[in-house]
Image (spheres, rainbow, N blue to C red):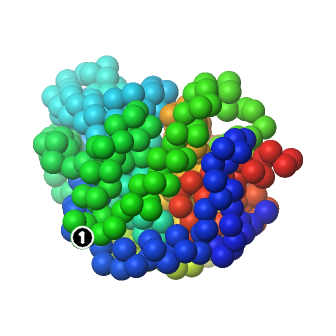
Amino acid sequence: MGIKSNEQKIPLSVSNPLISTINIESHASSIHSTTSSIPPSLILTTLVAVFGSYVFGSSVGYSSPSQSGIMNDLNLTVAQYSIFGSILTIGAMIGAIGSGKIADYAGRRVAMGFSQLFCILGWLTIAFSKVAWWLYIGRLLVGCGIGLLSYVVPIYVAEITPKNLRGTFTAVHQLMIGFGMSLTYLIGAYLDWRVVALIGTIPCLVQLLSLPFIPDSPRWLAKVGNMKESDSALQRLRGRNTDVNQEAAEIKEYTEALQRQKEASIIGLFQSQYLKALTVGVGLMILQQFGGINGIVFYVNSIFIAAGLSKSIGTIALVAVKIPMTTLGVLLMDRSGRRPLLLVSAGGTCLGCFLTAISFFLQDLHKWKEASPVLALVGVLVYVGSFSLGIGAIPWIIMSEIFPINVKGSAGSFVTLVNWLCSWIVSYAFNFLMSWSSSGTFTIFSTICGFTVLFVAKLVPETKGRTLEEIQASLNSYSTKR
């Protein structure tokens, strides 16, 4: 099921023979020559976009270091705090439902700005909460914002970057999530939870105030019929002296053909021509979340304490692993390809969960009491490092690549909703699962991570080095032949 080499001629048709055959080899050499140096405008635009990713990470990372402070100050039980931790994902599901439509009809920039208004209001509500209900409302609002951000940021970055840089630039989304999460862990270890919530508004304001100064997506502008603005945005993103005629013509040709087709609804996604893309997109999101990531990062301090470790040592070690491994994933994304990184990453998360499960199992048997905490630390670090290398970022990258523009809104909303639904299930159930059996919990996660390896090996295509139009045409061609 791999994708054919770049030397072939692939008809860019989405069940539509009207689009002509493009010589991929000459196009690839053209793009390579025009993107040998990265324009500062592309870097700055991407940086503004991924401030939203930082907000995403800080929101996810907030619940772990703040747990003891919030529970003591507001007299919350474990069950009440589980609601606070997991309600973020309820809000994210609400945000995900409308994410595709908002991004399609108002534009990617407006969608990012709209999401930051929710996040700012949510952080302020948390910071000034006196009772649990206000805390829940604030967390819900932040969730609505990051549900929208989790869709629109990787979509926007994928649409503004050339194909030979798309994986690296889109992976910066995950790098900034990791940076936001890690910095919030560290800040939360030393500052009051209310102060940390107020600090959470700063990156929201930075992105909100910067959005008017960056261009919208050339592909979205073409979709809504603003071809002149699309060409202008593309020229700005590629550099003043770069010839963008061929890329602009390809975007226009592909978009015009897609616009002859009806905009697909959620139900329409289940047609045969989209089935391959939908299976890959939804499958990766389900496996990413059921591998346990949000349960682990939401409550990592409690895991370390249960394992007999100092939470401060565990948190510092976690930060020391997460950022370098995410950075390595960014650097390798357009060199090794998506599939190899996914396979290594999923294998590593399987191993990490297995080691952690063994640690808790030995603890239950009262054996190797000195070694089991260290084994738990190693297991969690292997898991988080492996997750950061690939499985954290790549499902979002592939989601941003595989759906044609006429279904991207509906498909993106659906895939993002599935991701956050699975995230809620894991984050809400995690504390209860740990109470049932710590070793059993991590054994379940390890098994799911092992299944992820098989899923990637059998179904996930390689998308490195291909334009969005080529990827989508290949997947649709596959589905049609089936």
From the viewer's perspective, tell me whether residue 347 is left or right of residue 374: right
State the residue in front, 82 or 265. 265
Q: Give the farthest residue toward the right.
A: 482
Is residue 6 in view? yes
Is residue 371 in view? no
Name the residue type under label 1.
Answer: Asn
Residue 287 point in image, percent of width and height: 65, 51
From the viewer's perspective, tell me whether residue 227 is left or right of residue 465: left
State the residue in front, 316 or 94. 94
Vertical placement of 142 versus 53: above or below?
A: above
Residue 49 point in image, percent of width and height: 29, 51
Residue 454 point in image, percent of width and height: 77, 62
Mark 1 secondary-structure assignment: loop
Q: Which residue is depicted at the point 57% across and 65% down?
A: 466
Q: Quadrant of residue 247?
A: bottom left
Q: Which residue is depicted at the point 36% across and 74% down?
A: 35
Q: Which residue is depicted at the point 52% across and 39% down?
A: 256
How many labels sit on residues? 1
Of the 4 image quadrants, the one containing the N terminus is bottom right
Residue 69 point in image, percent of width and height: 26, 42
Vertical placement of 96 versus 234: above or below?
A: above
Q: Quadrant of residue 117?
A: top left
Q: Quadrant of residue 432?
A: top right
Q: Return the residue at label 1.
A: 241
From the viewer's perspective, tell me whether residue 360 is left or right of residue 330: right
State the residue in front, 85 or 329. 329
Q: Which residue is depicted at the point 30% across and 73% down?
A: 38
Answer few, some or many: residues within 10 Å of disc 1's Cα (few below 14, many 20 plus, some between 14 and 19). few
